[in-house]
C-alpha cells in the first residue's frame, strides 16, 4: 500500500468533488509512486526508481520539486544503499532547470553535501561532480553565500571523507572569485588539506592541485603570493612520508613549469633529480613514466638541464626495479631525440650500451617494452649508427625466447626499413616469423599474420617465395582458431593484390584446388575456409581466372551436405554473377543454381538464395 501521509494536503479549489479528487490523485501520484518504489526490498528496483528521478521532477513541476521531492530525498537517501545514493548524486547534477532555474540552484547543495559525506569513493565522486556542475550555474553572490561556506564546512569537519570531497570543489570557484586576495584565502584553506592528518585527504589534495594550477595559469591569475603558496604546497608533498602521495608531486611540478610564471627552473630541476633518486620505486616509476613531458620542458640549452640530468637517466635505465626500467624504456625515443643535438658522443658511449643491456634484461616485460620502441631510434641515429649499433640488437631480439619481443620487433620493421632497408635482417627474420607462426598463443599467430603483407612489400616476391612464406600463408587456413583462419583469408587476398594474378594462381588458387583432392577436404571447416578464400579473391582476379578456376570450384559446393556451406555458396555466386555479362552461359548456369537453392530444405539457404536472385 502506498503511503502518502507525509505529503502536504493539496488545496481544494474546484467546486466539483469528483473533479477535485481526480486532480489530487494525479498530483500525488508521481511522488507517491517514487516513495513506494524507494521502499522496495530489491536494490535494483530502487536504483531504477532513482534513474527516473528527473521524470518525476518534470511531472511535479519546479515548485513541488523544491517543496516536496527534495525534502523527501533528504530523508531517504542517506539511509539507502550506495548504489542508490550514487545514482541519485548523478541525477541531481541536472536538476537546476527542474527546480526553477539558477536562482533556486542552491537548494540542491544541502542534499549533495550529505551525499558527499559517504565513504564510498564512487558515491562521493558523483556528488562532487554534481556540485561542480551546479556551481557553474551559480551567480557570484550565490557562490559567496552558499558554495564557499559549503567548501569551508567540508574542509573543517572532523570526518576525513568530507575533507576528501572538499578537495574536488575548489576548481569550480577558484577562477570566479573577483580578487587574488580571495583566491589566496581559498588556497590557504586548500593548504590546510595538503597538511591534513589523513593520508587519503593529502593524496586527493595533491591529485587535484595540478588542476588548480592549470586553471590559474590559463586564466592569468598567478601572482607572487599565490606562486609562493603553491610552491609551499609542492614542498610539503615532496616531503610527505607516503610514497603514494609523494609521487603525485611529479604532475604538480609539470603544471608549475608549464605555467611559465618563472624562467628559473633550478629548484624544479633539483626536485626532479631528487625524485629520480628517491628510495621508493613507485616514485622513480612515476618520474620515469612522465619523462616524455618533463624533458621537453627542461630543454633549455642555456642551462644544459638535459645534459645535467643524463647521469640520472642512466641510473633509471639501470634501476633495480623492472617496472622502472620498463617505464624509462618507453621514453627512449624522446631521450635520444633531445640529447643527440647536444652531445652525440654521449649517446654512443653511454646510452646505446645501456640499450644493449636492456635488450637482454632478465625481465620479459622490459624486453617487450624495448622491442616496441627500439625501431623508433633508427631515424634519430641515422643509417650508419643504426647499422653499427642497433642492427645487432634487432638480430638478437628476433631470437628472443619470449614471443611478444619477437613480434614487437617485426611489427615495427617498417621504420627500420625506411632507414637501412630490411635486407640486412633477412636471415634472422625467417626463423622468427616461422616461430611466431606456430606460437601456442593464437593472438601471437594472429598478430604475425597481420604483419605478413607489410613484410611482403618490403622483402619482395622472390624472397617471399624462396623462403616458404607462401606455403606458410596457406597453412594458416588450417588453423583450429576461426580468427586465425579469417585473418589468413584476408592475408592471401592482400598478397594477391600485391604480387599479382600469376602469383595468386600459382600460390593460392592452385594450392586450394590441391586441397580439394586431399582428405582434409572431407572436413567441412576446410571446405568452408577454401570457399571463403575464393570468395575474397572474386574482386582481385581477372575474368578468365574467375570463370575458369574460381567459379567451378564454388559451383561444386552448391550441393554440399552442410547448410552453412550452401548458403555461403549462394552469397558467393551472387557476387560472381554481378561480374558476368548477362549473355554469358555461366551467368545462366549460376541463375539456375540459385533458383534450385531457393527450394532448399534449409531456411537460411533459401533466404540467401532469394536475396541473391532479387539483387540481380
Image: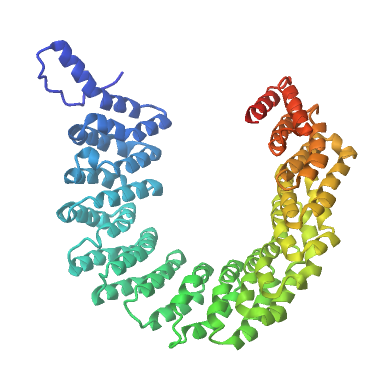
Residue at x-position 42% and y-position 28%: 42
Quadrant occupied by the C terminus: top right
Asked if 232 appears above or below 572 in the picture, the reply is: below
- Residue 558 drawn at (x, y percent): 78, 29
| Left or right: residue 107 compared with residue 482 | left
Quadrant occupied by the N terminus: top left
Q: Would you say residue 471 is visible in this rendering?
A: yes
**Between 372 and 584, the one nearer to me in the picture:** 584
Asked if 388 appears above or below 214 in the picture, the reply is: below
**Between 613 and 170, the one nearer to me in the picture:** 613
Q: Would you say residue 318 is visible in this rendering?
A: no
- Residue 349 drawn at (x, y percent): 64, 86
Q: Specify the quadrant of the image occupied by residue 53.
A: top left
| Left or right: residue 41 compared with residue 597 | left
- Residue 428 drawn at (x, y percent): 79, 68
Asked if 229 appears above or below 88 in the picture, the reply is: below
Residue at x-position 40% and y-position 39%: 83
Q: How many marks?
A: 0
- Residue 500 drawn at (x, y percent): 76, 55
Residue at x-position 67% and y-position 81%: 385
Q: Specify the quadrant of the image occupied by residue 213.
A: bottom left
| Left or right: residue 48 compared with residue 360 | left
Asked if 278 appears above or below 469 in the picture, the reply is: below
Q: Residue furthest front?
A: 583
- Coloring scheme used: rainbow
Q: Specify the quadrant of the image occupied by residue 4.
A: top left
Residue at x-position 37% and y-position 39%: 87
Amino acid at each position: 500500500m502506498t503511503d502518502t501521509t507525509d505529503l502536504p494536503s493539496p488545496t481544494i479549489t474546484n467546486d466539483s468533488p469528483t473533479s477535485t479528487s481526480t486532480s489530487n490523485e494525479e498530483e500525488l501520484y508521481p511522488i507517491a509512486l517514487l516513495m513506494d518504489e524507494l521502499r522496495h526490498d530489491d536494490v535494483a528496483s530502487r536504483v531504477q526508481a532513482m534513474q527516473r528521478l528527473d521524470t518525476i521532477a518534470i511531472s511535479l513541476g519546479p515548485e513541488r520539486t523544491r517543496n516536496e521531492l527534495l525534502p523527501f530525498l533528504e530523508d531517504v537517501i542517506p539511509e539507502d544503499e550506495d548504489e542508490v545514493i550514487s545514482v541519485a548524486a548523478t541525477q541531481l547534477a541536472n536538476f537546476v532547470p527542474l527546480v526553477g532555474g539558477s536562482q533556486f540552484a542552491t537548494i540542491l547543495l544541502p542534499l549533495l553535501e550529505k551525499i558527499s559525506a559517504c565513504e564510498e569513493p564512487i558515491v562521493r565522486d558523483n556528488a562532487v561532480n554534481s556540485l561542480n556542475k551546479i556551481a557553474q550555474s551559480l551567480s557570484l553572490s550565490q557562490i559567496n553565500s552558499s558554495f564557499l561556506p559549503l567548501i569551508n564546512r567540508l574542509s573543517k569537519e572532523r570526518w576525513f571523507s568530507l575533507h576528501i570531497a572538499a578537495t574536488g570543489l575548489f576548481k569550480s570557484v577558484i577562477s570566479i572569485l573577483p580578487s587574488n586576495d580571495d583566491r589566496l584565502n581559498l588556497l590557504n584553506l586548500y593548504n590546510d588539506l595538503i597538511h591534513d592528518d589523513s593520508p587519503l585527504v593529502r593524496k586527493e589534495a595533491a591529485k587535484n592541485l595540478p588542476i588548480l594550477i592549470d586553471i590559474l595559469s590559463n586564466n592569468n591569475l598567478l601572482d607572487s603570493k599565490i606562486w609562493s603558496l603553491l610552491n609551499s604546497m609542492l614542498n610539503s608533498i615532496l616531503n610527505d612520508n607516503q610514497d603514494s602521495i609523494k609521487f603525485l608531486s611529479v604532475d604538480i611540478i609539470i603544471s608549475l613549469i608549464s605555467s611559465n610564471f618563472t624562467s628559473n627552473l633550478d629548484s624544479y630541476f633539483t626536485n626532479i633529480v631528487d625524485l629520480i633518486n628517491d628510495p621508493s620505486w613507485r616514485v622513480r616509476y612515476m618520474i620515469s613514466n612522465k619523462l616524455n613531458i618533463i624533458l621537453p620542458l627542461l630543454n633549455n640549452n642555456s642551462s644544459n638541464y638535459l645534459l645535467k640530468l643524463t647521469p640520472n637517466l642512466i641510473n633509471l635505465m639501470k634501476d633495480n626495479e623492472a617496472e622502472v626500467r620498463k617505464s624509462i624504456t618507453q621514453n627512449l625515443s624522446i631521450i635520444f631525440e633531445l640529447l643527440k643535438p647536444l652531445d652525440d658522443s654521449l649517446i654512443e658511449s653511454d646510452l646505446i650500451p645501456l640499450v644493449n643491456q636492456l635488450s637482454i634484461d632478465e625481465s620479459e616485460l622490459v624486453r617487450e617494452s624495448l622491442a616496441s620502441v627500439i625501431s623508433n631510434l633508427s631515424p634519430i641515429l641515422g643509417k650508419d649508427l643504426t647499422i653499427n649499433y642497433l642492427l645487432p640488437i634487432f638480430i638478437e631480439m628476433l631470437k628472443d625466447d619470449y614471443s611478444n619481443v619477437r613480434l614487437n620487433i617485426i611489427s615495427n620493421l617498417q621504420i627500420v626499413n625506411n632507414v637501412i632497408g630490411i635486407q640486412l635482417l633477412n636471415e634472422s627474420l625467417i626463423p622468427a616469423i616461422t616461430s611466431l607462426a606456430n606460437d601456442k598463443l593464437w593472438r601471437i599467430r594472429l598478430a604475425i599474420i597481420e604483419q605478413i603483407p607489410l613484410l611482403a612489400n618490403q622483402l619482395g616476391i622472390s624472397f617471399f617465395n624462396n623462403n616458404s612464406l607462401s606455403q606458410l600463408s596457406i597453412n594458416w587456413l588450417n588453423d583450429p582458431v576461426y580468427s586465425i583462419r579469417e585473418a589468413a583469408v584476408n592475408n592471401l587476398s592482400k598478397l594477391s593484390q600485391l604480387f599479382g594474378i600469376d602469383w595468386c594462381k600459382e600460390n593460392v588458387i592452385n594450392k586450394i584446388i590441391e586441397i580439394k583432392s586431399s582428405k582434409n577436404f572431407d572436413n567441412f571447416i576446410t571446405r568452408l575456409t577454401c570457399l571463403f578464400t575464393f570468395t575474397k579473391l572474386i574482386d582481385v582476379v581477372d575474368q578468365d581466372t574467375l570463370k575458369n578456376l574460381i567459379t567451378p570450384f564454388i559451383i561444386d559446393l552448391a550441393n554440399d551436405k552442410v547448410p552453412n556451406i550452401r548458403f555461403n555458396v549462394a552469397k558467393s555466386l551472387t557476387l560472381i554473377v554481378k561480374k558476368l555479362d548477362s549473355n554469358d552461359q555461366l551467368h545462366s548456369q549460376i541463375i539456375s543454381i540459385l533458383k534450385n537453392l531457393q527450394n532448399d530444405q534449409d531456411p537460411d539457404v533459401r533466404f540467401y538464395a532469394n536475396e541473391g536472385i532479387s539483387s540481380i
